[in-house]
Image (cartoon, grey):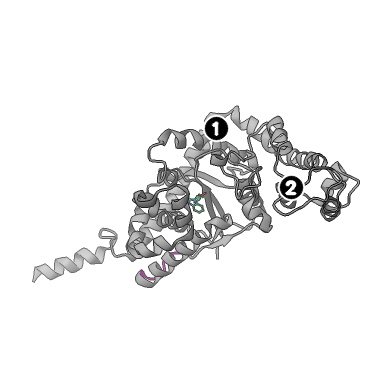
Amino acid sequence: MEKIILTGDRPTGRLHLGHYVGSLKRRVELQNSGEYSKVYIMIADAQALTDNADHPDKIRENLIEVALDYLACGLDPAKSTLFIQSMVSELTELTFYYMNLVTVSRLQRNPTVKAEIQLRNFEASIPVGFFTYPISQAADITAFQATTVPVGEDQLPMLEQAREIVRRFNLTYGETLVEPEALLPANQICCRLPGTDGKAKMSKSLGNCIYLADTEKAVKDKVMSMFTDPNHLKVSDPGCLEGNAVFTYLDAFCRDEHFAAFLPEYGNLDELKAHYQRGGLGDVKVKKFLNAILQAELAPIRQRRAQWEKDIPQVYEILRHGSTVAQAHAAQTLAAVKKAMRIDYFGDAGLMAAHVARYQG
Ligand code: TRP
């Protein structure tokens, strides 16, 4: 079977290192692997509006930032279709039909929705659009017959819900939709990169993010003020790795060759960790090492971004063209869905003929 990728991001802010290790880096590898016949990368502006109805300009302004971040990371419009969700109206239509296959109580049990409702203090004032976004996400995925959805761990309940909708649809109306699979980051640490303050997750509202578009100096300043072990006061003190954001980042980003390049006294991360735990290794030295690694990773991204920033009309053209390509694919799926649902009144010549026969007596 043809292997197709679909994934995307809400354009509510610039993309950060959490997005990068959690999904973006992998997408670029998958795009370049040659294993997938199609790769769709969607900027989920319509989904972003489900909890930002009062802030349309925020979405509008961040759409271009996300597109630039995508291109900066190495997503290549020659290999991947980059598109805008709201440009593909078929997705909303599919959502409407899938709504009949999902119960309110099933949506209420979706752990991601539950967590987000809490996070946003919605309580009784949950917008219906927000509440139902897992259904719209199932439409995003199935519209492209996606087999593979590279996402972070937090999106697993969305995938499970999409799979249920597919099974329910196929059972009710006949085999039509493809059941997708999630593809998680290979490295567990990458599923949940903490913020620079050591808090659970990088999040714009907590101000603990390192953005892909940050300058070299901004990255360095953030790394040098990162949360480590609050009890590691003197260099000679033994240090703790648990909850130490600097070491968590090293787990996510450090490879053995980084030692040869930036810290040749150690052969690998285990040696560095052992020294830290023993005492005698200062935070500043570890932070400088992390900074060197991150700068090496981010420099090419920053350079590519700077190139694309000089050609914004071309970025708009990529999105416009990608949206046209995506729409053509989604239209095929919608036609198949409507046919399966018996609402293809004009595509079925036999239907009118049967009605003519009924009334000709
Ligand atoms: N929910 C995703 C996020 O918050 C964005 C998204 C929308 C998505 N539709 C999708 C991701 C379909 C994967 C597949 O970033």
Residue located at (86% from left, 50% from top):
279
Q: Horizontal placement of 22 versus 10: left or right?
A: right
Q: Residue flagged by tag 2: what amino acid is it?
A: Asp
Q: Position of residue 359 (x, y in %)?
A: 10, 68
Quadrant of the image containing the C terminus:
bottom left
Q: Horizontal placement of 29 versus 55: left or right?
A: right
The span shown in magenta is 173-178
Please tell me whether residue 108 is drawn above or below residue 67 in the rendered image. Answer: below
**Quick check: is 105 in the magenta stretch?**
no
Q: Mark 1 or mark 2, which is nearer the start of the sequence?
A: 2
Ligand 1 under 8 Å from disc 1 Cβ: no
What secondary structure is marked by label 2?
Answer: loop
Residue located at (13% from left, 70% from top):
358
Work out whether residue 201 or residue 219 is closer to the camera in this orientation and state it. Answer: 201
Q: Position of residue 187 (x, y in %)?
A: 69, 57
Q: Quadrant of residue 197?
A: top right
Asked whether residue 317 is in view, the answer is no
Q: Quadrant of residue 264?
A: top right
Please tell me whether residue 107 is drawn above or below residue 18 in the rendered image. Answer: below
**Residue at the disc numbered 2:** 229
In the rendering, which numbered label is found on residue 314?
Answer: 1
Work out whether residue 193 or residue 341 is closer to the camera in this orientation and state it. Answer: 193
Q: Position of residue 109 (x, y in %)?
A: 43, 63
Q: How many marks?
A: 2
Q: Residues within 10 Å of mark 1 (few under 14, many from 20)?
A: few
Q: Residue flagged by tag 1: what amino acid is it?
A: Gln
In the rendering, which numbered label is found on residue 223?
Answer: none
The residue furthest right is 265
